[in-house]
Image (tube, grey):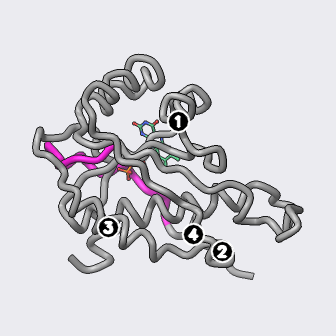
Amino acid sequence: MDLQTCIHTRRSIRTFTSDPVSRDTLEEAVSLAAWAPSWKNTQISRYLAIQDPEALHTICEQYAPFNARVIGGCHTLVAQTFVKNRSGFERDGSFSTDRERGWQYYDCGIAAQTFCLAAHALGLGTVILGIFDRKGLEQYLNLPEDQELMALIAVGYPAGTPAPPKRKDVETLLSFR
Ligand SMILES: Cc1cc2nc3c(=O)[nH]c(=O)nc-3n(C[C@H](O)[C@H](O)[C@H](O)COP(=O)(O)O)c2cc1C
């Protein structure tokens, strides 16, 4: 698949088949996501693949009821985390710019989209999920102290191809000075 087609045909997938996602395929998607650009090449994004059905059930029930249908139907839930206090920070711990902690989230966004495009090219469907109890889930997942939970990404083989939601036209998005 060429890049234009990959960008155009990636959709947020919320319904999956029961086919398992192999460790090899996830490793391939993450090895491609590793090529995402990041603040001073700090590469802060991490991926925790949750496949245990009991853990997925607990996450649906207790930490992400709004997205329970999606998470309950996916094979793998990737918790995207990041190593704190590197992207956008100086060595002495001060902020590099007035964006303060914001560059961490920026880097994670780029990495997440790179992961989703790579997954799509490998035949997988994904949807980024932002609505969940972050602090509760961080505790449940027993994240290392130096990491923060950024987003959840449901992963599986797509059960269908949703119609593409409309996009704004280039005249709205692009301006010149
Ligand atoms: C930061 C972020 C958070 C999102 N959170 C959710 C979510 O909690 N639940 C959900 O079903 N979709 C979520 N989405 C998916 C968007 O709704 C979706 O990307 C958008 O409607 C465009 O559709 P497309 O990805 O198929 O092009 C999220 C997407 C992003 C980038």
Q: Mark 2 near ligand 1 (CB under 8 Å)?
A: no
Q: At label 4, which amino acid type do we have?
A: Gln
Q: Quadrant of residue 57?
A: top left
- The Cα atoms of the two marked residues, 3 and 4, are separated by 17 Å
Residue bearing the label numbered 3: 118
Q: Is residue 85 left or right of residue 28?
A: right
Which mark, residue 142?
1
Q: Is mark 4 within 8 Å of ligand 1?
A: no
Q: Amino acid at mark 1?
A: Asn
Range of the magenta residues?
154-169
What label does residue 175 carry, if any? 2
Viewport quadrant of the C terminus: bottom right
The CA span between labels 3 and 1 is 27 Å
Which percent across, then down, holds residue 163? 25, 48
Determine contact: label 3, label 4, CB under 8 Å. Answer: no
Distance Cα–Cα, label 2 vs label 1: 45 Å
**Ligand 1: quadrant of the figure:** top left
Specify the label residue 96 is tagged with. none
Q: Which residue is mark 4?
A: 43
Q: Main secondary structure of the magenta part?
A: loop
